[in-house]
Amino acid sequence: MTQIRLLGLLVLMGAGWGLSGVIAKPIVDAGYRPFGIILWQMVIGAIVPGTLTYARGKPLRFAPRHIALYLFIALTGTLLPNVASYTALLHLPAGIMSIIIASVSMFAFPIALLLGNERFEGKRVLGLLAGLIGVVILAGPQAHLPAGAWVWIAVALIAPFLYGVEGNVVAKWGTAGLDPIQTLAGASLIGACLAIGMTLATDAWIDPFTAWDLPKVLIIANSTLHACVYSAYVWLVGRAGATFAAQVSYLVTGFGVLWAMILLGESYGGWVWVALGVMFIGLFLVQPHDSAENTASEAA
């Protein structure tokens, strides 16, 4: 029964994360700028895990090494990748963005080799090549995406690259004695401070509590959803291990494409589905093996 519950949580997380990426589309289409959106994501992201960590009697720590960790995770885990994603989302369908995000593992593996976190494996190299082929198919004219889509696909790929950097750095050097919820809360707090400055500098301030419209409601809903799903993810890593939790990548992509079709009325040509299939094959081949699970779960 416990296994069934964990599988149920994994499915809910995939559905929630996939929905989070899709409901960002009408927000950016309404003209709201990235840093204004990110600010509220960071604020709510600090409140949810911050409340959890204090309720557990584990307050945040602010030694220099902890602040450096928070800053690194805020930049590579939210601020910079979200700027890239929201910018690309203005020019790409939401479902295509969901497919692109599946390439996190494709970036994570070569970075892991460079840092010495992983050993060379032929099967995973084949997975990396499959992922690259999937991206090439998406960027080519046969996919029938908007003109110049390859430029925005390149911008969108900044996000999974940074997620790959973040995961590998944490896996190699740890979280300075902090557990995942503490780390997430501290990174969100530092990220909110950075986002305030960038929001004001780019004239991107959003007041979601006045003159309510659908995009403003979605900003709060999306930020809350992301904070809850991310907190559930780090809990699941600790409970079931990193290898089990990593399977959420398939679900996020699958649900993201499904939600985009249902909620946004998106449709895709045959080559997009071929690209999705090739990406899934690559994702399956490049996933970490079970022997890396303990290290990854401790670092997550």
Image (cartoon, grey):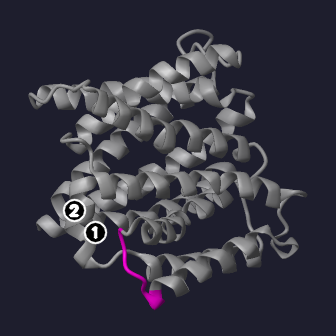
The answer for how far apart the CA atoms under marks 2 and 1 are is: 9 Å
Neighbor class of circle 1 (other Cα within 10 Å; few <14, some 14-19, many 20+) is some
Which residue type does callout 1 highlight?
Answer: Phe
Residue that extends furthest to the right in the rendered view of this protein: 147
Out of 170 and 139, give the one closest to the viewer: 170
Query: Where is residue 167, by image quadrant?
Result: bottom left
**Could you say whether the residue bearing mark 2 is in a helix, strand or loop?**
helix
Out of 270 and 92, give the one closest to the viewer: 92
Which residue type does callout 2 highlight?
Answer: Leu
Which residue is found at the position 34% from the left and 39% from the top? 228
Position of residue 283 in the picture relative to residue 198 (left or right): left
Check if mark 2's residue and mark 1's residue have beta carbons within 8 Å. yes
Which residue is found at the position 47% from the left and 68% from the top? 114
Residue 191, above or below 193: below
**Could you say whether the residue bearing mark 1 is in a helix, strand or loop?**
helix
Which residue is found at the position 40% from the left and 58% from the top? 168
| Residue that label 1 marks | 244
Extent of the magenta region: 117-123
Which residue is found at the position 56% from the left and 59% from the top? 101
| Residue that label 2 marks | 6
Q: Position of residue 25 (x, y in %)?
A: 66, 42
Residue that extends furthest to the bottom in the rendered view of this protein: 122
Position of residue 66 in the picture relative to residue 73 (left or right): left
Could one spot residue 241 in this view of the protein?
no
Neighbor class of circle 2 (other Cα within 10 Å; few <14, some 14-19, many 20+) is some
Decide which of tag 2 and tag 1 comes sooner along the chain. 2
Mark on residue 143? Answer: none
Decide whether residue 164 is among the magenta residues.
no
